[in-house]
Amino acid sequence: MNRGIPIFVKDNKLQYKLGRTVFGIKINDRFQTDEVNAVLDYLAEPEIVNNKAVQTLMDEAYCIDTYRPCYATLVPKLIRGKYRVYLHLT
């Protein structure tokens, strides 16, 4: 909790920076593509999306997902003798 991973958009792709290392997401399936695109849409216009979510909650008593990234956790795994680092985005 005392360390953050900066998220930014470059070439219409999510990029992350940890120290001097910049990395992104390899998209392997349609679910991942949809989720990444939803986060990119939020990052393009965060205030509009937040206002829409608040207004929907006030008018209809219904919560909508904004896909606002809150936390990013790095998950290292040893797979077939090589370390892979996965990003768990919440």
Image: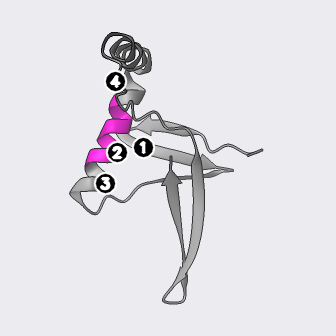
> Marks 3/2: CA distance?
6 Å
Q: Which residue is mark 2?
A: 36
Outermost residue toward the right in this view: 2
Contact, mark 1 vs mark 3 (Cβ under 8 Å): no
| Among numbered discs 3 and 4, the one appearing first in the sequence | 3
Residue at the image position 38 percent from the left and 37 percent from the top? 39
User: Which of 21 and 52 lies nearest the eye of the viewer?
Assistant: 52
Q: Is residue 33 positioned above or below 69 on the image?
A: below
Q: Are marks 1 and 2 in contact (CB under 8 Å)?
A: yes
Q: Which mark is residue 14?
A: 1
Amino acid marked by disc 1: Leu
Identify whether 58 is placed above or below 63: above
Residue found at the very far bottom of the displayed protein: 81
Residue type at mark 2 is Val
Instruction: Give the residue pinned by disc 4.
Output: 62
In magenta, the rendered stretch is 34-41
Question: What secondary structure is found at the residue carrying circle 1?
Answer: strand
Quadrant location of residue 27?
bottom left
Q: Which mark is residue 73?
A: none
Label 3: which residue?
A: 32
For the point 37% across and 11% down, the residue is: 55
Q: Nearer the viewer, residue 54 or 47?
A: 54
- First in residue order: circle 1 vs circle 2: 1
Give neighbour class at mark 1: few <14, some 14-19, many 20+ (Cα, 10 Å): some
Element class at badge 2: helix
